[in-house]
Image (cartoon, rainbow, N blue to C red):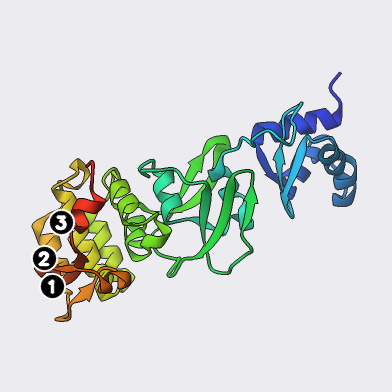
Amino acid sequence: MVTERERFHGEVLKRQIVTFNEVEEIIQQTRPNLIRKVIHDVYVAPLIKQNKLMRIRRGLFLGLPLGYSNDQPLDFDKFLLAAKIRGKQGVLAYHSALEFYGCAYNEFNEILLGVKTYFTPFTVGRIEVRPVFLPKSGLGIVERTIPNNVKVKVTSRERTFLDCLNHVDYSGGWEECLKSFESLGGLDFKKLIALMSSMSVGQLLIRKAGFILEVLRDHSIYYQDVLERQLKKLESWLSPSKLYIDKSSRKEKNELILRWKLYTPHNFLETNLRGI
């Protein structure tokens, strides 16, 4: 006969990662009057001691299979972990959003979680969870359903494109960023330009976006619908000044992209689009 504690463990394994509120929900299905302290002392603490449950951080737990030993790698869905951190306030962003959309050129052992207020980074198994500031977090955020019918917030494809250009350091560097963009399908270019207007993006990001959209139009089937009038719209927003695509490139040999008034390092495209 399955004990109540075994039933609880089985339910946690189905869900992979649970908050303490979910722990309460599971237990109270059969023991509706138990208080939180009793639930912790009778169910949570013993399973942690038996290596069937791992405390990730306060109020967040990972189910461990029977026979698990500490030298085994942890197996869990990192997007599920992201969805349950910070009371669902965080947003998958930058390279983690590229991974969510299935276009990242490489998979990283980290979660970049866009937040309004920071928390201390922490590691679960091989995955590091890092908070990153996400400006104007009310714009370009969507909610998606992942396995176990869990909702997760993620930057939209359009917002992801802009954020990654704005913070290439959060996107794996230029080569990783551009090769990931090459496979980023589903971009709505009309929405992209409208979002840029709503976010009042700066001059450098306008130049980067126009330049990269024009380049990818010739490299990827996903950008063949970029219209010349859309590029001209971005071009009309440019100030007379010329800017560098990267601060670090000021010391290098640069080439001027006339249309976008943008200095790029010599052989920038050849270096970062190799293999495409």
Going from N to C along the chain, the mark reached first, 3 or 1, is 3
Q: Nearer the viewer, mark 2 or mark 3?
A: 3
At numbered mark 3, what does the secondary structure look like: helix, strand or loop?
Answer: helix
Going from N to C along the chain, the mark reached first, 2 or 3, is 3
> Neighbour class for label 1 at 10 Å: few (<14), some, many (≥20)?
few
Disc 2 designates what residue? 232
Q: Where is residue 60 drawn, in percent x and y?
A: 71, 49
In the figure, residue 274 lies in which quadrant?
Answer: top left
Look at the numbered discs 3 and 1 and tell me whether their residues touch, using CB distance below 8 Å: no
For this rendering, which residue is in front, 107 or 137? 107
- Total numbered circles: 3
Look at the numbered discs 2 and 1 and tell me whether their residues touch, using CB distance below 8 Å: yes
> Neighbour class for label 2 at 10 Å: few (<14), some, many (≥20)?
few
Left or right, residue 64 beside residue 241: right
Q: Is residue 274 above or below residue 129?
A: above
Which residue is depicted at the point 84% across and 35% down? 50
Q: Mark number for residue 236? A: 1
Q: Where is residue 43 drawn, in percent x and y?
A: 85, 39
Dot 2 amino acid type: Lys
| Spatial separation of the CA atoms under disc 2 and disc 1 | 6 Å
Which residue is depicted at the point 42% across and 56% down? 94
Q: Mark number for residue 61? A: none
Q: Where is residue 246 drawn, in percent x and y?
A: 29, 69
For this rendering, which residue is in front, 140 or 217? 217
Disc 3 designates what residue? 214
At numbered mark 1, what does the secondary structure look like: helix, strand or loop?
Answer: helix
